Image (cartoon, grey):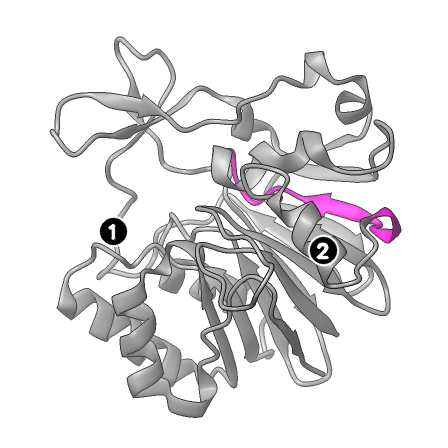
């Protein structure tokens, strides 16, 4: 399986673009999947520079309903024709994030409507708790909070802007690919908590260890203790390959590299990674 980072917050190669967002192309023997689309056409431009043909994609997974993961979908090449687009129905709710003043909110939801794009609307596959894409490829959503040190998402809201409710990120879903070495888990932002997500994967696939984690982990503003506990959790699971991306945060990535050593691959836009 080959994994190509098309969009990330960082890049380090000449001619590539970066933006606050995530997009990953996965080449697997059973399906070629685009996991998220960033917020603009950056993923298309980087894919072209990497010599990757997005028209070969069998399906698109939208990990959750935020602009930096779904905004770029409208730029997908192919004259308005789309492969199947897997997204949780709750992703289309109005979504907001608390600003730094602690009082006001900004919109962070999907910046387009399916009603405005016939190609998108006709290709949507609404997902729930479990959706099987191919014999060894599964989407797992509605991730429960089971790890005590993470709790529930904070600072995210949904619904009426004048009277929003806390967004429990019911729509965030992880892509799990079963390989000979174990599970390969892809996460967009891990809003329910990366440990919660990993724990859910272990429970959903009993007897299978997690071999590879490719994820935005939303660790840039967590406490040093929570970061330490998260890294220890990954060590306890004996994950062989860990690729921290996007919202993980540069300090968190540096700490993960320090403690995880050769298990941690701090990749960015324009990089590729191969696993069994």
Quadrant (top left/top right/bottom left/bottom right) for the N terminus: bottom right
Left or right of 197? Residue 165 is left
Residue most extreme to the front: 14
Q: Is residue 86 magenta?
A: no
| Disc 1: which residue | 151
Quadrant (top left/top right/bottom left/bottom right) for the C terminus: bottom right
User: Percent position (x, y) of residue 36?
Assistant: 61, 46
Query: In whole angstroms, how far apart are the C-alphas of marks 1 and 2?
Result: 37 Å
Residue most extreme to the bottom: 262
Decide: few, some or many residues near mark 1? Use Cα within 10 Å; few <14, some 14-19, many ≥20.
few
Kindly identify the residue that appears in the image at 53 percent across and 30 percent down: 91
User: Percent position (x, y) of residue 124?
Assistant: 75, 30
Kindly identify the residue that appears in the image at 29 percent across and 80 percent down: 232
Whether residue 57 is visible:
yes
Using the image, tell me which numbered label, if any, was put on residue 123: none
Left or right of 246? Residue 132 is right
Label 2 sits on a secondary structure element that is: helix
- Residues drawn in magenta: 55-65
User: Percent position (x, y) of residue 44?
Assistant: 70, 46
Using the image, tell me which numbered label, if any, was put on residue 47: 2
Q: Nearer the viewer, residue 235 or 10?
A: 10
Rendered view: 100 above or below 139: above
Kindly identify the residue that appears in the image at 24 percent across and 35 percent down: 155
Q: Is residue 60 magenta?
A: yes
């Amino acid at each position: 399986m080959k994994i190509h980072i098309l969009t990330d917050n960082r890049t380090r190669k000449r001619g590539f673009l970066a933006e606050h967002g995530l997009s990953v192309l996965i080449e697997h023997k059973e399906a070629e999947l685009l996991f998220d689309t960033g917020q603009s056409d950056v993923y298309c431009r980087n894919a072209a520079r990497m010599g990757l043909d997005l028209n070969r994609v069998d399906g698109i997974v939208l990990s959750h309903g935020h602009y930096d993961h779904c905004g770029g979908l409208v730029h997908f090449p192919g004259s308005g024709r789309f492969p199947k687009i897997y997204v949780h129905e709750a992703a289309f709710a109005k979504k907001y994030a608390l600003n730094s003043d602690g009082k006001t909110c900004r919109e962070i939801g999907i910046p387009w409507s399916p009603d405005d794009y016939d190609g998108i609307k006709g290709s949507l596959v609404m997902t729930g708790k479990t959706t099987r894409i191919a014999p060894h490829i599964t989407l797992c959503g509605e991730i429960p909070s089971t790890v005590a040190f993470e709790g529930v998402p904070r600072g995210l809201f949904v619904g009426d802007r004048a009277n929003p409710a806390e967004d429990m990120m019911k729509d965030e879903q992880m892509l799990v690919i079963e390989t000979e070495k174990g599970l390969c888990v892809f996460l967009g932002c891990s809003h329910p908590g990366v440990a919660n997500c990993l724990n859910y994967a272990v429970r959903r696939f009993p007897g299978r260890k997690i071999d590879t984690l490719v994820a935005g982990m939303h660790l840039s503003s967590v406490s040093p203790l929570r970061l330490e506990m998260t890294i220890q959790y990954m060590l306890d699971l004996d994950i062989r390959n860990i690729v921290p991306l996007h919202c993980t945060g540069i300090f968190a990535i540096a700490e993960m590299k320090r403690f995880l050593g050769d298990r941690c691959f701090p990749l960015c836009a324009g990089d590729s990674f191969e696993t069994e």
